[in-house]
Image (cartoon, rainbow, N blue to C red):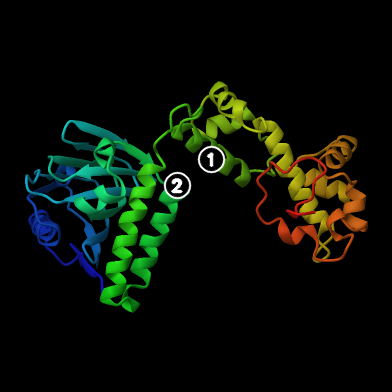
Amino acid sequence: MSISISTEDVAPGEREAFWVATLAQLFGGAFAVSAPGGMPLNMAIRLLRLGALSVAETVGNAASFDERGRDGSVAVAAYVLREGAATLRNGDAGASLGTGDMVLVDLRRDTGIVFEGEFRLCTLVVPMRRLAEVFPQWQDFCGRALHTTCGPAAVMQDIVQSAFHHCATLSPADRGALGLALAGMLGTVLAANIDPAGNERSRMENFHIERVKAHVREHLQDPALSIAAIAAAVGLSPSYIHKLFAREPMRLMQWIAAERLDACYRELACRSGQRRPIYQVAGSWGFDDQAHFSRAFRGRFGITPREAREGQPPCMKDGGASCCEYAESISGVVPAKSCFRSRC
């Protein structure tokens, strides 16, 4: 079972001392905790032991935490800031953290973290020896902010949340095995942030490309979607976005057009639900010029919009399900005149 502790029933004047004692009891070590401007400290934590690995989720208000380095420590902590903003120092290294950032902390060094407002923090405490087995270079990442909104890091976060949700059904053996798996997963996350020699694009660039694409997908039907608007929304310059997509299979506006065409195809090819006129389908996805839409549609799929609606798409010549059943996740890099189904 998980352990849950909060300051809710503690007198405001006693909360800082209570929380220092709580952290020492759960994690060992010497802590100092304070809230800014005499504000009362509001904290809650839940902790799950997974064999030799511990997972904790802490929520609270603006506060600063300091932990004295432990010379004999045999553990490493990974902090994942799920919500909020913070600054962290670990020995001589430091990082600014935003929502979705992760940082590795060597518990042998003095550590301090300042939360600027309300926050939600996930902490993994991993045996140092186990982490060294799966990723010997772990010390190179201490105090560096890593992004966790996609790839192996996002999968690791999902596993942690699922472990909390199902903890009552886990046997001691299950917990130990899950702890080993999470340590291995953390090694995979760190390894994914190493750029091999000669790699043309950094992990940071990959991260920004995914941010841009996520914003586009959320606003794909916005007729005002432009590089300038996207840049303003994601906090990047238009020139940097052009640079990011210069080595992609499609430039950004080409990719947006492809995503919109894919959306039109899915609606036109589906045989159920409300069937809007073709011009309304095109217009709702940003195609106001019907002649241009028809040319672009044929160039991408090899059939006209009307053929997609009234006839069988190429993948159904020999029977089978329609392409729309295979098009729930379109990457935007399907070659022109190819079908959504992988082997058509």
Q: Secondary structure at mark 1?
A: helix
The image quarter containing residue 220 is top right
Q: Residue at x 42, y 33 (%)?
A: 195
Q: Is residue 239 above or below residue 18?
A: above
Residue 61 visible: no
Left or right: where 261 falls relative to 201: right
The quarter of the picture where the C terminus appears is: bottom right
Relative to the observer, which residue lies in front, 178 or 120?
178
The quarter of the picture where the N terminus appears is: bottom left
Residue 283 visible: yes
Tell me the distance, in whole angstroms, between the alpha carbons under discs 2 and 1: 9 Å
Q: Are marks 2 and 1 in contact (CB under 8 Å)?
A: yes
Q: Position of residue 134 (x, y in %)?
A: 31, 50
Q: Which residue is mark 1?
A: 210
Residue count near mark 1 (Cα–Cα under 10 Å), binned few <14, some 14–19, many ≥20: some
Q: Secondary structure at mark 2?
A: loop
In this rendering, the count of numbered labels is: 2
The image quarter containing residue 117 is top left
- Looking at the rendered structure, the kind of residue marked 2 is Thr
Q: Which residue is mark 2?
A: 149
Q: Residue at x 29, y 77 (%)?
A: 171
Left or right: where 209 falls relative to 126: right
- Looking at the rendered structure, the kind of residue marked 1 is Glu
Q: Position of residue 338 (x, y in %)?
A: 80, 46
Q: Position of residue 166 (x, y in %)?
A: 37, 73
* Image disc number at residue 309: none
Residue count near mark 2 (Cα–Cα under 10 Å), binned few <14, some 14–19, many ≥20: some
